[in-house]
C-alpha cells in the first residue's frame, strides 16, 4: 500500500517548547520510530509542516543588519524543507538500516489571483502577547491574528494547484525510496502565462491541503494526517467534546472545525477520499501504525454512492 504521511508542526516542536535544534531532533526521533514500523510493509511519502521554523527564520532575517531586505517567504520555506528534511532523513536512516531515503525540495504551483493573497490567515512563528505582536506588526508590516494562547503572524495561504516534482517522486518510489517532500506545503510559485517561468510568492501553502493533493497525484491508497490529538473531536475543548472515530467526507465537513487547527486537516482528508475513493485518517503522532491498522484515530471513508 502507498501511504502519504502528513506530519503536523508539533512533530518537531510542541507548543511552548524552545525552537532549539536538539529539541527538534529529539522529537523527530520519536516520530520516526512509528513511521519505520509502517515502512517495512508499505511505500511511504512524508510531508510536514513548517510554521514554527519559517517564523523563526523570518524573524532572524528581518533582524539581520547585513541584509538590505529580509529573505522572502518562498526562500525561507525552501530553507525549512532542507532543515526538516535532513532531520527526518538522518533519523529514518538510523531507524531503517539499508532502506533508501531521499529528501526532495518541492515546489507547489499556486494562482497569482488567488483571493488568499488579500486575506492572510496562515499562522507562522511563535506566539506573542498582544502588545509585542502589535509592535512587531507595526515595525515589520506584518498581519497578526489571535491564536489559542496569544497572537501570531499570519501570511497568505493560497490553494495548491499542482506539485511540480510529482514525476520525480513517482520515480523515487518506483526505485524503493522513502520520499520526504512538499514540506511546509511546498515552495509556493506562480508560472508566467507566456513562458512558464516560475516566480516565488510571499505565502505559505497549507501543509494538509498540499498533502491531499500530493497523495492524489502520486496515486496513494491512504492519506495519514498525524497531529497532537488521538482523533477528531466535535466541540473540542468543551465539556461536551466527543470523539469522531469514523466519518464520510460529508459527515466530516458538517463538524465545522476551526480554520486554525483541525479545519484544514478535516478538509484535506475529505478531499482525498472524495477525489480518489481511497482512505484517510487523522490521529496521534505516536500511533501511526495503529491508525493504519484501524485501532486508533479517525477513519475517513467514501460515502455510499447515490442510486
Image: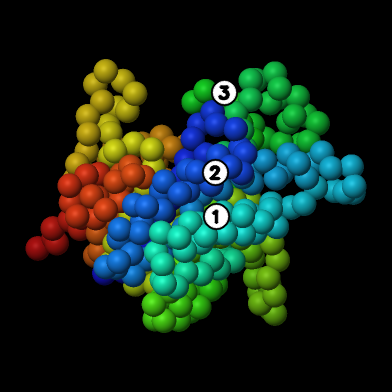
Crowding near the residue tagged with mark 1, few <14, some 14–19, many ≥20 C-alpha atoms within 10 Å: many
> In front: mark 3 or mark 2?
2
* Label 3 residue SS: loop
Q: Earlier in the sequence, mark 3 or mark 2?
A: 2
Pointer 2 local density, CA inside 10 Å: few below 14, some 14–19, many at least 20: some
Q: Residue at x 47, y 43 (%)?
A: 27
In the image, residue 98 above or below residue 135: below
Quadrant for residue 45, please give it.
bottom left
Name the side, left or right, on which 178 lies relative to 51: left
**Residue 204 seen in the current view:** yes
In 3D space, how far apart are the residues under numbered discs 3 and 1 (Cα atoms)? Answer: 29 Å
Q: Residue 29: percent from the left, percent from the top?
A: 45, 49
Q: If you read the primary sequence from the N terminus, does the residue marked by circle 1 or circle 2 appear first?
A: 2
Quarter of the rendering occupied by the C terminus? bottom left
Location of mark 2 (residue)? 24
Q: Position of residue 233 (x, y in %)?
A: 28, 33
Give yes or no for contact between labels 1 and 2 (Cβ–Cβ under 8 Å).
yes
Name the residue located 55 percent from the left edge and 68 percent from the top edge: 104
Question: How far across and down, in percent of the image, does residue 115 sit?
Answer: 58, 50
> Real-space Cα distance between discs 3 and 2?
22 Å
Residue bearing the label numbered 3: 150
Residue 87: mark in rendering = 1
Give the CA distance from mark 1 to mark 2.
Answer: 8 Å
Amino acid at each position: 500500500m502507498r501511504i502519504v504521511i502528513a506530519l503536523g508542526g508539533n512533530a518537531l516542536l510542541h507548543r511552548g517548547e524552545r525552537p532549539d535544534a536538539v529539541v527538534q531532533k529529539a522529537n523527530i526521533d520519536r516520530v520516526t520510530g512509528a513511521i519505520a514500523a509502517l515502512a517495512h510493509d508499505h511505500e511511504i511519502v512524508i510531508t510536514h509542516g513548517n510554521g514554527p521554523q519559517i517564523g523563526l527564520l523570518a524573524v532572524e532575517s528581518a533582524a539581520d543588519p547585513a541584509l538590505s531586505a529580509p529573505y522572502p517567504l518562498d526562500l525561507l520555506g525552501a530553507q525549512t524543507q532542507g532543515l526538516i528534511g535532513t532531520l527526518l532523513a538522518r533519523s529514518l536512516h538510523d531507524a531503517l538500516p539499508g532502506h533508501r531515503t531521499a529528501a526532495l525540495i518541492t515546489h507547489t504551483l499556486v494562482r497569482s489571483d488567488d483571493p488568499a493573497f488579500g486575506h492572510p490567515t496562515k499562522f507562522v512563528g511563535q506566539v506573542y502577547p498582544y502588545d509585542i505582536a502589535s509592535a512587531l506588526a507595526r515595525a515589520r508590516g506584518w498581519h497578526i491574528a489571535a491564536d489559542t494562547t496569544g497572537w501570531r503572524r499570519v501570511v497568505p495561504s493560497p490553494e495548491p494547484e499542482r506539485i511540480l516534482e510529482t514525476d520525480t517522486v513517482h520515480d523515487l518510489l518506483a526505485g524503493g525510496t522513502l520520499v520526504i517532500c512538499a514540506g511546509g506545503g511546498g515552495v509556493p510559485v506562480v508560472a508566467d502565462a507566456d513562458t512558464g517561468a516560475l516566480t516565488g510568492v510571499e505565502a505559505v501553502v497549507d501543509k494538509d491541503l498540499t498533502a491531499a493533493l500530493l497523495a492524489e497525484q502520486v496515486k496513494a491508497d491512504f492519506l495519514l494526517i498525524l497531529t497532537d490529538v488521538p482523533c477528531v473531536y466535535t466541540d473540542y475543548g468543551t465539556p461536551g467534546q466527543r470523539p469522531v472515530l469514523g466519518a464520510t467526507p460529508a459527515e466530516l465537513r458538517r463538524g465545522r472545525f476551526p480554520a486554525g487547527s483541525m479545519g484544514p486537516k478535516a478538509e484535506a482528508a475529505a478531499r482525498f477520499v472524495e477525489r480518489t475513493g481511497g482512505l484517510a485518517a487523522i490521529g496521534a503522532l505516536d500511533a501511526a501504525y495503529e491508525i493504519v491498522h484501524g485501532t486508533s484515530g479517525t477513519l475517513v471513508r467514501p460515502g455510499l454512492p447515490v442510486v
